[in-house]
Every structure is written in structure tokens, then in C-alpha cells.
Amino acid sequence: MIKAITGTKDILPVDISKWHYLEKLLRETFQLFNYKEIRTPIFEETALFARGIGEETDIVSKEMYTFKDRSETSITLRPENTAGVVRSFIEQSLGAQQSLNKLYYIGPMFRQERPQAGRLRQFHQFGAEALGSTSPLLDAEMIQVAYHILKNLGLKNLVVKINSLGIPEVRENYKNVLRDYLKDKKDNLSEESRKRFETNILRIFDSKIEVDQTIMKNAPLLIDYLDEQSKNDFEVVKNYLAKVGIQFEVDPALVRGLDYYTKTTFEIVSGSVGAQSALCGGGRYDLLVEELGGKQTPGVGFAAGMERILLACENEKSLNLPQDSIDVYLIRVDSKTEQNLEPALSAGRLDLKLELEIISLSSKLRQEYISCDYDYLNRSIKAQMREANKFNAKYVVFIGGDEFNRGELNVKNLSNGEQQLINIEDFEKLKSIIKS
Ligand code: HAM
């Protein structure tokens, strides 16, 4: 049997209402903050991610789904959407049409990581990018948007972590300070961190390994080496968050795994999802547009993992979704189905007049936006009733038998059991009962 690829997941009808609920909340929230949706392709040229995210990052060096297409172009399934949005911003000259572009996206991303709870190889992100302003108010707005969404999902166990990585010159200078600090401790670091010492020294802060953490506990912190502008901007972010009632922690070790960040970085973590606790992450990237060949344009953004968020909602039982239902289930009262004939036997013996009446009625109901369904399997009345209950039908309409011959329908309200006979021609009456 062919199975789904490791780390990918089917989203089945029983779970889809959570996704619809989340997607509706996202669109409403982005509308509230005046962000416009952008949809970029799921695959791009590999060079975009290598240059945008950074060759030495875990994403680019180990996790990308990269392949040559038939014309020998190296293609990569997008591991994130910031690089794609920036590519589109440059290519479509969005900056020429609008001085500040506030954009959002929702869609699948791909990373070949080791799957575990909350970590998949195809996962979904929603995110936002604002291109065109250096204002730290926008950094804080990003945090506010993400927080607004998570709070409105009923999540409680949240911590907002913020940090500043400063401007590149400061960071380069600080890397030397860190290198000096680690020089004589290097041999005690884990193998992974020894590698990072050479390639991406800041990421040693991300290590979950105890020896590394012990060594990094006393390391000098970038936040103590910030330039004036970065320091001031960071204060603005903190003041904004305090003003709108969002509690936060300053986490000087929050370096993030992508190379494009400058100044503010942030994550919102949840205590309800286990090891993969970051529900969202983001920050400012004032050099990325230029790096990818555009005019100098500052940017800031975030992305959030939708599977992880829904897992947190499930663990906190924070969503109270209405059950799926339909308005009406039409039940065929047919002497043949009543005898409970095998479908194969009864198939050729449809009462065409009755079937056509059901088809006509269902069609009229749907025209009026009343949802309905009926049986295609020639099942008994009892089995059709079971089906109506399974779909949480609000009403059933019995069509057939003596009543049908007299030109009547029997409408039953399944929540209180009340039944009414109505004239088959009187559609207005049927409609008013169901819509009441
Ligand atoms: P990121 O931190 O790599 O940032 O991913 C953002 C979020 O996506 C994570 O916090 C997590 O919730 C989710 N996520 C990442 N990898 C997986 C996975 N394998 N399975 C499930 N969920 C996952 C970015 O992607 C940046 N583009 C964010 C950004 C936008 N920065 C500025 N603008």
C-alpha cells in the first residue's frame, strides 16, 4: 500500500472545522490591522533561499527539499515565505505602488526535519511582512497581531520573548567578543556547537545540550553591546507592548535560526505543546531586500506554525467549536426501501416519481441557502434516520407513502420532535418552518 510521506499529514473532514475557524480568525485579524494577502508560488529557485535565509543555517544546509527540474534548474519547495514575499516585492515593484506594504500569507511550507509532535515536513504557516518602514512601532505591531490571534483562540499558556540583534557591524563586533570568550572553552562544547563556532557562532545559544548551556550561561550578551539606534528602537518596542497590555520577557539568547535578522527578534512560546514550543517567530530584516537585489527597503515580519497552534488549542481545550450540521435531511419513504432490500436488488426499482420530487425539493432548498442531503444507497427509513442524526440534521422531511400520494410532506424538527404535514406545493411554508 502507498502511504503518505513521513512527516506529512492528511487533514481529514473531522478536523477541518478547526482549520476553517483558524483561517477565518486570521483573515479577520489581518483585515483589522490592514494587512493585504499575498500568495507566492510554493517552489522557487534554490538560490533565493540560499541567499535569503543564509547558506550556513540549518534550513538551507540540511532541511530543504531541493531537486533539479527537467530543464536542470535547481528548484526548492519553500521552507518559509519571507524570501518569496521579498522576491515578489522586488520583481513586481510593489514598493513603487505603495510606500509601506503590509502583507500576509497562509500556506504550506516544507522542511526535511526529524518529525515529532508539532514538527512536520509539510506544515502550514500564516505570517505577515511589512516592507518599507524602519519604525519599531511596526516591530511591536507584528507581535501584537500574533498575540491577538493566539489570545483569540483562547490560549493562555503563552510567553512573549523579545530580543535585539542590533545592526550588522555591532553583531560582527560582538561575534569577536563571543569568539574570545569561547576560545579556551571550545573543546568542551558539543560537536554541533564546535561546528557552529566556525560557521554561525550566535546559534550556539540555541543549543539544547547541557554542556553547551552551562558554558553559554556566562557568555557576554549581544544586548549589552547594542548601538544607540538599536537600543532606542528596542525601548520603543517594549513601551508599545506595555501600553497595549502584552507582557513580555527579554531573552538575550533569542538569536533565531535564519540569517536575515537585524535589530528586533521575537518568539511567542507555549507551555502546552512540549519540546516544539515556539508557536511563532519573527523579527526585523532591514538588509534582506537589498541582499536579494532590490532597492534598500527595511522590513519586519513573523510566521506562525498552524499545526502547533492547533495542538496547543487541543491541549488547552481552548476551542469551543459548534458541531458540524446540515439544515435538512430528506428521507425517502418508499415501500421498496422499507423492505430493506439489498442496494443491488433495489437499484433498478427506483420510484422515479419520488426520486425526482426529492431532487426538485433539494434543489429549491439549496437555492435558498438551506443545506440538505439525501440517501443515494436505497437504505431503509431507519438507516436514513441514522444518517440524518449522524449529520446533525436540524430537520428531516419525509417524502413518500400515502402522504406523498395525497400531495403532502411530513416535516420533523429533530431538536423537539415536533412534526407537521404540509402541502408539497407550499414551498414557502416549508422554508419558513426550516428558517424559523
Ligand atoms: P521560523 O521560526 O523558522 O521563522 O518559523 C516560524 C514558525 O513556523 C515556528 O515558530 C513554528 O511554529 C513553525 N514551524 C517551523 N518549522 C516547523 C515544522 N517543521 N513543523 C511545524 N511547524 C514549524 C520563519 O519561518 C520566518 N520566515 C519568520 C519571519 C517572517 N521572520 C520575518 N518574517
Image (cartoon, helix red, strand yellow):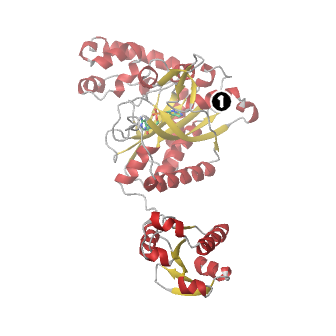
Q: Is residue 93 left or right of residue 347?
A: right
For residue 298, say whether it is visible: no
Count of marks, rendered view? 1
Q: Secondary structure at mark 1?
A: helix
Is the residue 327 above or below the residue 287 in the image?
below
Of 236 and 17, nearer the camera is: 17
Mark 1 vs ligand 1: CB under 8 Å? no
For residue 193, say whether it is visible: yes
**Residue 309 position within the rendered picture, expressed as x and y whole percent measured from the top left:** 43, 47
Residue extending farthest to the right is 97
| Circle 1 Cα neighbour tier, 10 Å, few/some/many (<14 / 14–19 / ≥20) | some
In the image, what residue occupies the spot 57% across and 51% down? 29
Q: Quadrant of the C terminus?
A: bottom right
Q: Is residue 210 left or right of residue 57?
A: left
**Residue 391 position within the rendered picture, expressed as x and y whole percent measured from the top left:** 47, 66
Q: Is residue 118 left or right of residue 53?
A: left
**Residue 419 position within the rendered picture, expressed as x and y whole percent measured from the top left:** 51, 86
Q: Quadrant of residue 251?
A: top left
Q: Quadrant of the N terminus?
A: top left
Is the residue 27 above or below the residue 227 in the image?
below
Which amino acid, by three-letter code, is at mark 1? Ser
In the image, what residue occupies the spot 29% across and 27% down? 217
Which residue is tagged 1?
A: 88
Is the residue 162 above or below the residue 262 in the image?
below
Q: Quadrant of residue 252?
A: top left
Q: Quadrant of residue 174?
A: top left
**Residue 87 position within the rendered picture, expressed as x and y whole percent measured from the top left:** 63, 27
Of 134 and 416, nearer the camera is: 416
Is the residue 273 above or below the residue 176 in the image?
below
